[in-house]
Amino acid sequence: MLLFLGSGCSHVTRRTLSLCLSSRNRSVVCSAASRRGSVHAKLTVAYPFINCAHRLFSQGKPFAVYALKRTASATTSRLHQLVMKQAKPTHRKALIFVCWLVYVGVVLCSDLLPGSSVFRIDSETIHEALDLSMNFFFILPLLSPSQAPVLHPVLESTFQIVVCWALLFIGFLSDDISRHCRTAQKQVQKQILPMWVFLVGSALLTNVFYLPYLVLRQNPSSLATIVDTDSSEHSLRPFTSTKKTVAARHSEADMLLRIAESRGLPLILCVVALFAMLWAFAGRPEYPAAPPFTLERFQLYWQAFLQKDRLAVSFPIDMLVFALFQAELVPDDMRRRGLNPQSQKGTRMLGVARWIPFFGVAWYLWTRPRLCDFSANAETEQAH
């Protein structure tokens, strides 16, 4: 039908359809459909075809070839925008909550994994956890090897990487900036619970605390950002602009934000994580039956720990869960700093943070714009 109309219809028919699909009539139809919800969504997807048909009927060109060339990219873009607009955050949070229930049920409470559950925990597991904590960041093994507990180097390495991964989320402490910051005109939306509580818990019990925070948190981007409608890319300006000055209420909060915004945080954690990887291959050459740079130490780790120790099994599972949900806080953090996650730069940064485990988020924390000038904000608060 469209092929016939595009190539073989009379001049009168083409002229009539061209008038029906003129710019003014299209705007009237779209504005009327905007009051009907689902109809507007359908017209949003179909608009590239309507626009293309208007050009075809006015020029008398075959529809099929022209449509394939002109509407493929536009239709894909509008479909993506439609899906992004209709995506409900509650569905995402429900999925994270289900993952948290499965994690707690399987890793902590069930007997599906090797070792004892939390209800039948033994003194050996508690002693092992304390020894790993004493070797935090390899400080004691490097400064005083004689006093440091001796553990399998691969077990120590996986523990340090998991701890570094959990501490990496300190860089998103600005997600809870509304608790200790305010604007000159109105109070910014508050989180239900302070983020630092979950960060401390994540350093101790990893995803037992990290996943619930993703479920309980409120997205502050709608109240904490200003949309710049004059920009062609519809970029977002941070709420720390000159129109609304953000000031720290307490020096403690200001210090926490300084640590979170420091580029030294991801740098230090990346150095520790890389050293932990090297430690897994070459650390503790005196360890029994675990010579460095050989497969024997990994075979021993598999036989002595992964098949018997619940604590050792939980570390790879923690890494997997962190890798799946490490970028959940990135889009709101980008909007908070004036970056549009759907722009070309924002899509690239979000892709790196989402698909590269650990180091992708560290790279984002290193390259993102600063939230605000804390010293200037502190002076502004004192002046008022």
Image: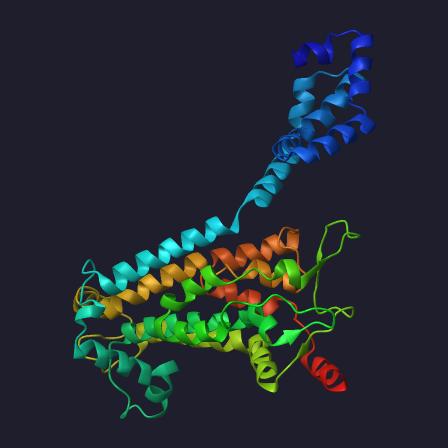
In the image, residue 120 sits, relative to residue 87, either above or below, namely below
Q: At 27% across and 92% down in the image, what residue appears?
A: 147
Where in the figure is residue 370, as x and y percent of width and height?
65, 71
Where in the figure is residue 9, as x and y percent of width and height?
75, 8
Left or right: where does residue 30 sit relative to residue 283? right
Q: At 22% across and 81% down in the image, what residue appears?
A: 127
Left or right: where does residue 201 sit relative to residue 237? left
Where in the figure is residue 281, as x and y percent of width and height?
31, 72
Placement of the N terminus among the 4 image quadrants: top right
- Residue 253 visible from this viewpoint: yes
Where in the figure is residue 75, as x and y percent of width and height?
63, 33
341, 137: nearer the viewer: 341
- Residue 284 visible from this viewpoint: no
27, 293: nearer the viewer: 27
Left or right: where does residue 230 sit relative to residue 354? right
In the image, residue 15 sits, relative to residue 264, either above or below, namely above
Determine the image quadrant of residue 225: bottom right
Determine the image quadrant of residue 215: bottom left
Q: At 32% across and 61% down in the image, what residue appears?
A: 317
Which colouring convention does the figure follow? rainbow
Q: At 77% across and 49% down in the image, what residue appears?
A: 232
In the image, residue 59 sits, relative to residue 171, either above or below, namely above
The mark tally for this picture is 0
